[in-house]
Image: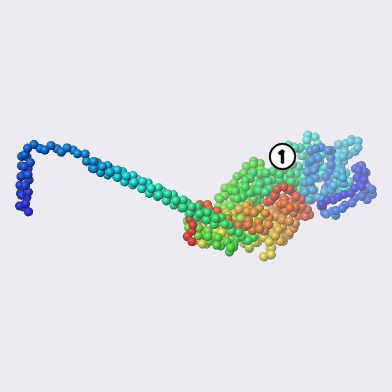
């Protein structure tokens, strides 16, 4: 390996002596327009531009698709939320009714109340108010107490099934706001009731069935 | 209908003069009485010189005396009237001639004369017919423009009742009540109905003993006890902490303490509040699984009767004013007697009025406090929310007997009733004490 170094230097010296020796230097070659290479360059440039444009188009398309997808998803989510909201609200719009001068929960209203429990469990930020009502019979003053007792009975049912008591307000309207303003058994039956009002929510979701 | 109808033959000849005094009534005069008279004194309201004011005052006083139910009112046939005359036809003396014999013959124990004197002052004179003496005389300045003038006339009537029976009348009083949803006030003789400021549904108006202030609840509204003043027209909510929906207030007889019912997450219970110092809320009942409401003070201020559901249906209980010693007050048969509501202690302390369901309709009852015996007063239609007049013998209550709910008055002693209100849907009456100027 050491020997090879001087040999390489010697060859280099020979070559340089030959170059300096000889006549005038040859004229530089006349530049020749190489159309092919221009075309090639142009083609290259064009293809780059096309590729860029293509990429931009694709990106735009992707973006549009993404946007449309997002919009569609948002719309679907909105629709789902709307449906959940409607569903929740319709569940809470269903009131419960009581027997004359009674405040115990009748069997026929238990499943509706359990539905309310599921919804409140699925919506931890949801708060409600329960308003108790009485029919026009009994004294005006007593009916205030009776409406209160009905609201408390409905609240106790929800609290018994795990809903925090501080998520439920209660109030009584006595006999002051009848649903049906008549004096017969059918009207009285409808007027003896507890109503559920959603007073605070966050986004409502359906409970997982 | 408990009125004495007197048929008098030869009435005009009776007016002739004192000669009649010596004539026995079975000679020349025939008096037929179509109503068997009770033990109530006969009362004759004498006519006078026609005059716009004195005529209307006379009509008001005559009605007040009638509404006191303390007298057999004597009416002459054909609206004829007798009036105090001059002592003699020649007018030679200013002495008035009072024909005691005639009034006595007509069945009168007392006669009232209303005459217009000088300086726009009416003279109202009560004659004791049996004793042939002037029993009382009052001067009433005519102040026709003064809104209190009618009450002045009522006060005269009440004084005439006091002079003749020992117990003042109840004409100078007003009733608070609820017409549809609004608060109203009306004179006890159905005049001067007024609307008082309120919003929402008014519940349970009651008088402060001063006759000016009143308490009521706008329900559900602010669900606080509101205090109004008739004189100033102001209304304020008392500042008891808002721990629930307050209703059915009651003042103690001195107007210092307000007891009311509160519906809350704890149920419905009674609380007392210092009305004078506007402080110091105190809970009187702890119902847990029962409700306690509709308090009423005994007139000595030491006891409170109220409604409690502790035995199932609402019934009337009583306790000391500090909430101790709670016990059943109005007896009932468990499972038989209907619910009992809206007690009000009579001003004389002897009776308690309330209403109780009888075969699905509320009826007014009174209980003798000493013996705790209970008596049903009404039976036709729905009759509820009784409130005592200051004489402890009249009750106002709401009755549907004519179809719509209106306020009626019943005299417990005679059973006589009269209608006070006629329009709208009336409820929750509260009768004032006697009102002074």
> In this view of the protein, can residue B393 be seen by the observer?
no
Determine crowd level at label 1: few under 14, some 14-19, many 20+ residues with C-alpha closer than 10 A: few
Q: Nearer the viewer, residue B311 or B162?
A: B311
Which quadrant would the N terminus of chain A be assigned to in this image?
A: bottom left
Residue displayed at 7% across by 45% down: A12
In the rendered view, tell whether residue B436 sits above or below residue B397.
Answer: above
State the image quarter where residue A147 is shown: bottom right
Residue displayed at 65% across by 45% down: B213
> In this view of the protein, can residue A207 be seen by the observer?
yes
Q: Position of residue A136 (x, y in %)?
A: 66, 55
State the SS at label 1: loop
Residue displayed at 57% across by 53% down: B244
Residue at which label 1 appears: B147
Q: Nearer the viewer, residue B294 or B160?
A: B294
The total of numbered circles placed on residues is 1
Residue projecting furthest to the top:
B119
Q: Chain of mark 1?
A: B
Q: Position of residue B90 (x, y in %)?
A: 91, 35
Q: Position of residue B316 (x, y in %)?
A: 66, 59
Image color mode: rainbow
Left or right: A124 in relation to B323: left
Residue projecting furthest to the right:
B27
Residue displayed at 70% across by 49% down: B425
Left or right: A111 in relation to B412: left
Q: Position of residue B217 (x, y in %)?
A: 62, 49
In the rendered view, tell whether residue B333 sits above or below residue B125.
Answer: below
């Amino acid at each position: 390996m050491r020997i090879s170094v001087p040999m390489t230097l010697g060859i280099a010296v020979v070559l340089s002596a030959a170059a300096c020796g000889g006549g005038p230097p040859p004229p530089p070659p006349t530049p020749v327009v190489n159309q092919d290479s221009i075309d090639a360059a142009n083609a290259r440039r064009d293809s780059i531009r096309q590729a860029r444009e293509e990429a931009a188009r694709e990106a735009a398309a992707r973006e549009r698709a993404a946007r449309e997808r997002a919009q569609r998803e948002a719309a679907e989510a909105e629709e789902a939320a709307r449906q959940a909201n409607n569903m929740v609200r319709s569940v809470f719009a269903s009131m419960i009714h009581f027997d004359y001068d009674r405040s115990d929960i009748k069997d026929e209203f238990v499943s509706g109340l359990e539905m309310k429990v599921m919804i409140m469990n699925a919506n931890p930020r949801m708060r409600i108010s329960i308003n108790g009502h009485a029919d026009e019979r009994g004294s005006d003053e007593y009916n205030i107490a009776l409406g209160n007792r009905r609201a408390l009975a409905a609240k106790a049912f929800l609290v018994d099934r795990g809903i925090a008591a501080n998520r439920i307000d209660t109030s009584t309207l006595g006999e002051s706001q009848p649903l049906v303003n008549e004096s017969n058994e059918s009207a009285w039956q409808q007027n003896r009731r507890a109503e559920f009002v959603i007073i605070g929510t966050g986004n409502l979701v359906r409970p997982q069935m | 209908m408990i009125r004495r109808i007197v048929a008098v033959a030869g009435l005009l000849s009776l007016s002739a003069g004192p000669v009649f005094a010596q004539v026995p009534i079975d000679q020349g005069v025939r008096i037929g009485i179509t109503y068997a008279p009770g033990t109530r004194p006969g009362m004759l309201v004498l006519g006078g010189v026609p005059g716009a004011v004195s005529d209307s005052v006379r009509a008001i006083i005559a009605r007040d005396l009638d509404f006191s139910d303390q007298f057999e009112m004597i009416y002459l046939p054909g609206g004829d009237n007798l009036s105090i005359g001059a002592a003699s036809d020649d007018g030679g003396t200013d002495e008035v001639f009072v024909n005691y014999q005639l009034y006595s013959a007509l069945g009168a124990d007392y006669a009232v004369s209303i005459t217009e004197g000088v300086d726009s002052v009416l003279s109202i004179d009560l004659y004791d017919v049996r004793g042939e003496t002037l029993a009382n005389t009052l001067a009433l300045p005519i102040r026709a423009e003064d809104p209190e003038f009618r009450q002045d006339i009522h006060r005269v009537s009440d004084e005439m009742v006091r002079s003749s029976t020992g117990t003042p009348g109840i004409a100078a009083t007003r009733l608070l009540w609820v017409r549809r949803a609004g608060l109203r006030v009306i004179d006890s003789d159905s005049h001067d109905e007024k609307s008082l400021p309120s919003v929402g549904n008014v519940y349970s108006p009651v008088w402060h003993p001063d006759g000016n202030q009143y308490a009521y609840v706008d329900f559900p509204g602010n669900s606080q006890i509101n205090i109004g003043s008739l004189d100033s027209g102001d209304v304020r909510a008392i500042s008891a902490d808002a721990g629930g929906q307050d209703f059915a207030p009651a003042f103690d007889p001195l107007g210092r303490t307000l007891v009311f019912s509160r519906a809350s997450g704890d149920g419905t219970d009674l609380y007392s509040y210092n009305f004078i110092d506007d402080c110091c809320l105190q809970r009187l009942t702890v119902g847990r699984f029962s409700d306690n409401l509709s308090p009423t003070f005994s007139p000595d201020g030491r006891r409170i009767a109220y409604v409690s559901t502790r035995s199932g249906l609402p019934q009337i209980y009583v306790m000391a004013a500090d909430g101790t010693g709670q016990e059943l007050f109005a007896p009932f048969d468990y499972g038989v007697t209907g619910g009992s509501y809206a007690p009000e202690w009579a001003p004389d302390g002897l009776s308690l009025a309330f209403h109780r369901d009888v075969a699905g309709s509320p009826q007014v009852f009174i209980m003798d406090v000493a013996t705790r015996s209970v008596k049903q007063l009404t039976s036709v239609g729905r009759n509820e929310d009784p409130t005592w007049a200051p004489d402890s013998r009249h009750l106002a209550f709401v009755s549907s007997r004519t179809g719509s709910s209106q306020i009626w008055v019943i005299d417990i002693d005679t059973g006589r009733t009269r209608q006070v209100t006629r329009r709208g849907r009336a409820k929750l009456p509260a009768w004032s004490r006697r009102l002074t100027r």
